[in-house]
Image: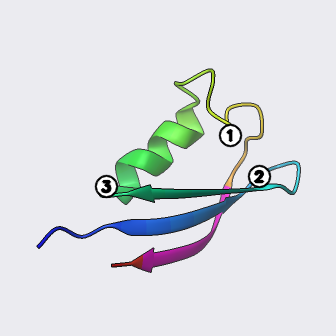
Amino acid sequence: MKIYFVYILKCYDDSFYTGVTDNLYRRLAEHNEGLDPFCYTVKRRPLELVFLKEF
């Protein structure tokens, strides 16, 4: 059985970003490194993980 995570990040501008991933550590690193210039969080760093649920 594969494990997934729903997560919520609080952005620097007090907005929130919600995502789903099967590799939480990799995905958080991608958000924090800002590799995708079109990602919602790229201009809203630093980010804070405020919610996490495994399923």
Answer with left or right where residue 35 lies relative to residue 55.
Answer: right
The secondary element bearing badge 1 is classed as loop
| Residue named by callout 2 | 11
Density class for disc 2 (Cα within 10 Å; few <14, some 14-19, many ≥20) is: many
- In percent of width and height, residue 41 lies at 68, 40
The secondary element bearing badge 2 is classed as loop
Q: Which mark is residue 41?
A: 1
Q: Amino acid at mark 1?
A: Thr
Residue at image location 88% in from the left, 48% down from the top: 13
**Mark 1–mark 2 CB contact (< 8 Å):** yes
**Which residue is more in the foreground, 6 or 49?**
6
Residue at image location 44% in from the left, 58% down from the top: 20
Residue at image location 62% in from the left, 32% down from the top: 39
Q: Is residue 40 magenta?
A: no
Does 12 appear above or below 10? above
Spatial CA span between label 1 and label 2:
7 Å
Residue occupying the far left of the picture? 1
The first of marks 2 and 3 along the sequence is 2
Q: Amino acid at mark 2?
A: Cys
- In percent of width and height, residue 40 lies at 68, 37
Spatial CA span between label 3 and label 1:
18 Å
Main SS category, magenta section: strand
The first of marks 3 and 1 along the sequence is 3
- The magenta region covers 48-53
Name the quadrant containing residue 32: top right
Residue at image location 52% in from the left, 25% down from the top: 35
- In percent of width and height, residue 24 lies at 38, 58
**Which residue is more in the foreground, 8 or 29?**
8
| Residue named by callout 3 | 23
